[in-house]
Image (cartoon, helix red, strand yellow):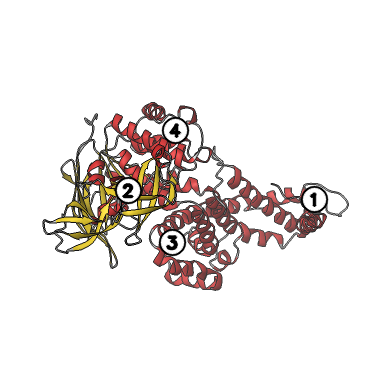
């Protein structure tokens, strides 16, 4: 039975909605203003596209985001599945390790990279993806852990194995589709972080989309706001693609994450 | 029975412990080709452990597992070619019924056409032709277990393993599906191991019933033999209802129970001179009382069980309550409060000393 919302509920929802939407509407309106502030148009967005390095840096960040998401899935899904299937004694340790990035300053990672990461990785921008995997671990671990807790994992894995599947086939054909929402959440978190991360990129002297925004925005206030709106819309598009893009033919009602 | 597809299974000296708990203790079981053996026992007796070890989902500490004469110890579960139906519903939630059934063939890279043809064939076998495109949550519990059975059979398994597949179902569906499993198993002739704690289920479905206790297979015989000639006291007490009546061993090695002499079956080699005789409710008869018989009793309760009625009677001489089962049509002759005499109509019984 559906519960009817009271007037008080609607008021709270309205306030929350306004709190969320009004600044964005203001930002969008500001980003559409012309030079004198009296006309509106897309001149600021045209200015963004005309800036040198826009496409290259956006593409760099997109590649980093994709690699980060793939690395997160490759590392986290088998690990957390293992913890759920029989490695429970490792759970506290792994949980602790996954929480560490929340308390260690990002600059420490940058210094660690400079001293410990293999040279062949330090020489490429993709070293950032490995660091982004670490930085996203607190969030992706939680998302995947909740997803796996919501399905009868052991029974499904044993049923799959007894049907003749290898562990890899079981993960790809049974487990991952069953926690699709959780995986989407982990992908979104990884992509959003990789697209917006600034500190590590600056400290390690790499040009990415956020560092490029920082550079070009200093010469044009309206352009800076337009870039912020552009980034925001970009992030929403990622959410949209992740949430409805590779939609399976079935509703995965069992998942919560 | 059509058993041309069946192969033999032998578990020899299998031992498994969990910490200090011995789940299987030198466990031995031989299953003939095409045979359906039910492992029966209370919770924690090791029956599921035996099945999981055979499936390759658990590993034993010692012992051999021979399938068709070949030792499969060390062979991973996905290479053993054993179909399994689990106690919990185990259909893959994001796959349709047809996809679930075809899963084993899909991971074996069998052509799509063959997958669909075989899956449809099995859907028909389990009577669910109309449900192929449904998801598992759109099926009832009984239907889900039917699909799980079809999925297990789809890979043409060497051995079919059923781990309490009916325990989550309601009574009516359980009986229907039980009969259906028996029919299908007879039809396909696959060697089958069925684990259950439900005696009626085991008796109804199995060619042989193996009764387990503390990780040991105590008796493995036909349902009739297990019920009528239990190998020892613990099997007798576990399988079916049993009265425990005070008994004394006589000089000619018989048992005297309430003044009546009954043969003593002593497989355990007991040397005790007295104890409690194990007599089934249907081995007791009620009649009109005579004066001063030690078996005189008074009816204290009647429990209607459908075709049978269980009558409880309190023995006057020692206050012991015993239970007698008789056709319901005759039970009206023994209302509560009626004085009766109890007669034992067994030729030999076991003694629990």
Identify the image quadrant of residue B111: top left
Identify the image quadrant of residue A206: bottom right
Q: Residue furthest left?
A: B252
Question: What's the chain of the residue with tag 2?
Answer: B
Q: Are marks 3 and 2 on the same chain?
A: no
Q: Determine whether B343 is above or below A113 in the image.
A: above
Q: Would you name the residue on which mark 3 appears?
A: A121
Q: Would you name the residue on which mark 4 appears?
A: B98
Q: Position of residue A163 (x, y in %)?
A: 35, 41
Residue B127: which numbered mark, if any? none
Q: As rendered, which of B282 and B299 lies closer to the eye?
A: B299
Q: Would you name the residue on which mark 1 appears?
A: A32
Q: Between label 2 and label 4, give the one nearer the viewer.
A: 2
Are circles 3 and 2 on residues that touch, CB within 8 Å? no
Q: Between label 3 and label 2, give the one nearer the viewer.
A: 2
Residue at the image point whose x is 49% and y is 27% from the top: B130
Question: What's the chain of the residue with tag 3?
Answer: A
Helix, strand or loop for disc 3:
helix
Q: Would you name the residue on which mark 2 appears?
A: B281
Quadrant containing the N terminus of chain B in the rendered view: top left
Are circles 3 and 4 on residues that touch, CB within 8 Å? no
Helix, strand or loop for disc 2:
helix
Q: Position of residue B30 (x, y in %)?
A: 19, 45
The crowding category of the residue bearing disc 1, from other C-alpha atoms within 10 Å (few below 14, some 14 to 19, many at least 20), is: many
The crowding category of the residue bearing disc 2, from other C-alpha atoms within 10 Å (few below 14, some 14 to 19, many at least 20), is: many
Q: Determine whether B92 is above or below B249 in the image.
A: above
Spatial distance from mark 3 to mark 1, Cα to Cα?
Answer: 41 Å
Spatial distance from mark 3 to mark 2, Cα to Cα?
Answer: 80 Å
């Amino acid at each position: 039975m559906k519960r009817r919302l009271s007037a008080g509920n609607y008021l709270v929802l309205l306030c929350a909605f306004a709190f969320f939407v009004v600044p964005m509407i203001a930002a969008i309106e500001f980003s559409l203003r012309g030079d004198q502030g009296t006309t509106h148009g897309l001149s600021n967005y045209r200015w963004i596209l005309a800036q040198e390095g826009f496409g290259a840096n956006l593409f760099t960040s997109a590649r980093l985001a994709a690699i980060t998401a793939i690395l997160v899935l490759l590392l986290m899904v088998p690990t957390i599945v293992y913890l759920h299937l029989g490695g429970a004694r490792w759970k506290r340790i792994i949980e602790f390790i996954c929480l560490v990035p929340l308390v260690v300053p990002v600059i420490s990672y940058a210094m660690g990279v400079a001293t410990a990461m293999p040279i062949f990785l330090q020489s490429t921008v993709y070293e950032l993806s490995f660091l982004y995997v670490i930085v996203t671990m607190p969030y992706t671990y939680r998302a995947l852990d909740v997803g796996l807790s919501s399905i009868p994992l052991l029974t499904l894995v044993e049923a799959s194995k007894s049907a003749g599947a290898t562990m890899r086939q079981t993960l790809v054909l049974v487990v991952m589709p069953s926690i699709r929402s959780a995986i989407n959440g982990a992908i979104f978190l990884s992509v959003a972080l990789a697209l917006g991360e600034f500190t590590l990129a600056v400290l390690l002297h790499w040009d990415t989309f956020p560092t490029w925004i920082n550079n070009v925005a200093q010469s044009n206030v309206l352009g800076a706001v337009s870039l912020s709106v552009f980034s925001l819309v970009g992030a929403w598009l990622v959410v949209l693609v992740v949430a409805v893009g590779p939609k399976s033919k079935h509703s995965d009602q069992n998942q919560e994450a | 029975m059509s058993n041309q597809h069946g192969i033999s299974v032998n578990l020899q000296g299998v031992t498994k412990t969990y910490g200090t708990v011995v789940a299987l203790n030198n466990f031995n079981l031989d299953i003939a080709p095409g045979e359906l053996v039910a492992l029966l026992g209370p919770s924690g007796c090791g029956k599921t452990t035996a099945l999981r070890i055979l499936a390759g989902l658990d590993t034993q500490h010692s012992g051999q597992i021979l399938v068709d004469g070949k030792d499969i110890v060390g062979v991973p579960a996905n290479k053993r070619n054993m179909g399994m139906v689990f106690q919990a519903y185990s259909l893959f939630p994001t796959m349709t019924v047809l996809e679930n059934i075809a899963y084993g063939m899909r991971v074996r890279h069998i052509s799509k056409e063959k997958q669909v043809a075989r899956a449809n064939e099995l859907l028909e076998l389990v009577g669910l032709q109309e449900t192929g495109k449904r998801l598992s949550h759109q099926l009832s519990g009984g239907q889900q277990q039917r699909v799980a059975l079809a999925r297990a059979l789809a890979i043409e398994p060497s051995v079919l393993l059923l781990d309490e597949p009916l325990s989550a179902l309601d009574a009516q569906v359980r009986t229907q599906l039980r009969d259906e499993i028996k029919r299908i198993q007879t039809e396909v002739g696959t060697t089958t191991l069925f684990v259950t704690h439900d005696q009626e289920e085991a008796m109804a479905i199995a060619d042989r019933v193996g009764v387990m206790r503390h990780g040991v297979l105590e008796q493995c015989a036909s349902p009739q033999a297990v019920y009528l000639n239990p190998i020892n006291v613990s099997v007798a007490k576990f399988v079916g209802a049993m009265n425990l009546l005070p008994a004394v061993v006589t000089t000619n090695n018989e048992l005297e129970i309430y003044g009546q002499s009954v043969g003593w079956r002593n497989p355990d080699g007991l040397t005790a001179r007295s104890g409690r005789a194990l007599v089934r409710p249907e081995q007791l008869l009620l009649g009109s009382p005579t004066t001063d018989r030690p078996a005189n009793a008074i009816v204290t309760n009647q429990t209607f069980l459908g075709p049978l009625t269980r009558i409880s009677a309190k023995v006057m001489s020692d206050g012991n309550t015993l239970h007698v089962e008789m056709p319901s049509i005759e039970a009206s002759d023994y209302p509560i409060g009626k004085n009766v005499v109890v007669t034992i109509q067994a030729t030999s019984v076991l003694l629990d000393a």
